[in-house]
C-alpha cells in the first residue's frame, strides 16, 4: 500500500511551487467501497473532504497517472470557485500539466467509470506459443516464466517461448 499522506504532501509542494491557492483545510479519506470514481471532492463545514479510491494505493497501479493525478485533480477543486471543471479549475490544471507533465483533464475519462485499464497493472512477462502464436502474459516471474519447457500451449499443445 502506498502512503497517501506522503503523496498528498508531495503533491501540495508541487502546487505551492506554482502558487496555486488550494485549501489547507482538507481531510483525505480512503474509499474502500466498490470504485465508481477514483476521486471525489466535497465541501465540509470546515473545509473539504477528498475521497481517494483505495485501488490507487495499490502498488501495482501507476502512481503518477493514478494517485498523483487524482490527488491534484481533487485539490484543485478546493480552490475558490473551482468545483466545476471550467474557468479557474481548468486554468490551474493546465498550469500543473505544463509544469510537471501531468495529464489532468477538464473532463477526466476516468470520472464516474470503472477503473480504467491503463491504471491496472501492466503485464511484465509475455509467453508465446511457437505453433499457434497464442500469447500469455504474467505479472510475476512464475514457473511458467522460469521453467517454460515444462508447459504447453493450452489451445494447441504447442511449445512455448518467453519473449522480451
Ligand atoms: Zn473533478
Ligand atoms: Zn498454441
Image (spheres, rainbow, N blue to C red):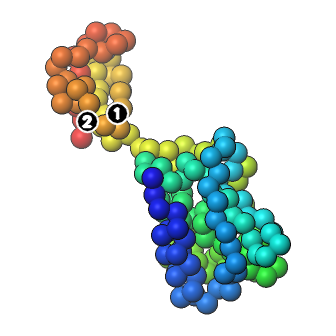
Label 1, on which residue?
138
Q: Is residue 81 above or below residue 112?
A: below
- Give SS at disc 2: loop
- Give SS at disc 1: strand
- Answer whether labels 2 and 1 touch (C-beta < 8 Å): yes
Q: Residue at x 33, y 22 (%)?
A: 133
Q: Residues within 10 Å of mark 2 (few under 14, many from 20)?
A: few
Q: Residue at x 60, y 66 (%)?
A: 71
Viewer-closest of 114 and 8: 8
Left or right: residue 140 compared with residue 34: left
Query: Picture coordinates of residue 117 (x, y %)?
Result: 54, 43
The furthest residue to the front = 46
Query: Picture coordinates of residue 158 (x, y %)?
Result: 25, 13
Q: Residues within 10 Å of mark 1 (few under 14, many from 20)?
A: some
Label 2, on which residue?
141
Query: Picture coordinates of residue 88 (x, y %)?
Result: 76, 80
Q: Is residue 24 above or below residue 56?
A: below
**Quarter of the view holding residue 28:** bottom right
Mark-to-mark CA distance, 2 and 1: 7 Å
Identify the image quadrant of the C terminus: top left
Q: Is residue 99 above or below residue 152?
A: below
- On the question of residue 104 being in view, the answer is no
Amino acid at each position: 500500500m502506498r502512503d497517501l499522506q506522503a503523496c498528498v504532501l508531495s503533491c501540495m509542494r508541487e502546487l505551492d511551487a506554482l502558487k496555486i491557492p488550494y485549501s489547507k483545510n482538507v481531510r483525505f479519506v480512503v474509499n474502500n467501497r466498490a470504485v465508481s470514481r477514483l476521486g471525489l471532492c466535497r465541501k465540509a463545514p470546515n473545509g473539504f473532504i477528498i475521497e481517494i479510491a483505495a485501488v490507487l494505493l495499490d502498488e501495482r497501479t501507476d502512481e503518477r497517472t493514478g494517485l498523483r493525478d487524482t490527488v491534484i485533480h481533487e485539490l484543485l477543486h478546493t480552490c475558490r470557485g473551482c468545483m466545476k471543471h471550467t474557468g479557474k479549475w481548468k486554468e490551474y490544471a493546465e498550469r500543473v500539466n505544463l509544469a510537471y507533465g501531468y495529464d489532468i483533464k477538464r473532463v477526466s475519462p476516468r470520472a464516474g467509470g470503472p477503473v480504467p485499464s491503463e491504471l491496472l497493472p501492466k503485464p511484465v512477462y509475455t509467453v508465446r506459443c511457437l505453433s499457434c502464436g497464442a500469447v500469455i502474459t504474467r505479472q510475476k516471474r512464475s514457473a511458467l516464466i522460469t521453467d517454460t519447457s515444462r508447459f504447453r500451449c493450452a489451445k494447441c499443445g504447442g511449445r512455448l517461448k518467453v519473449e522480451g
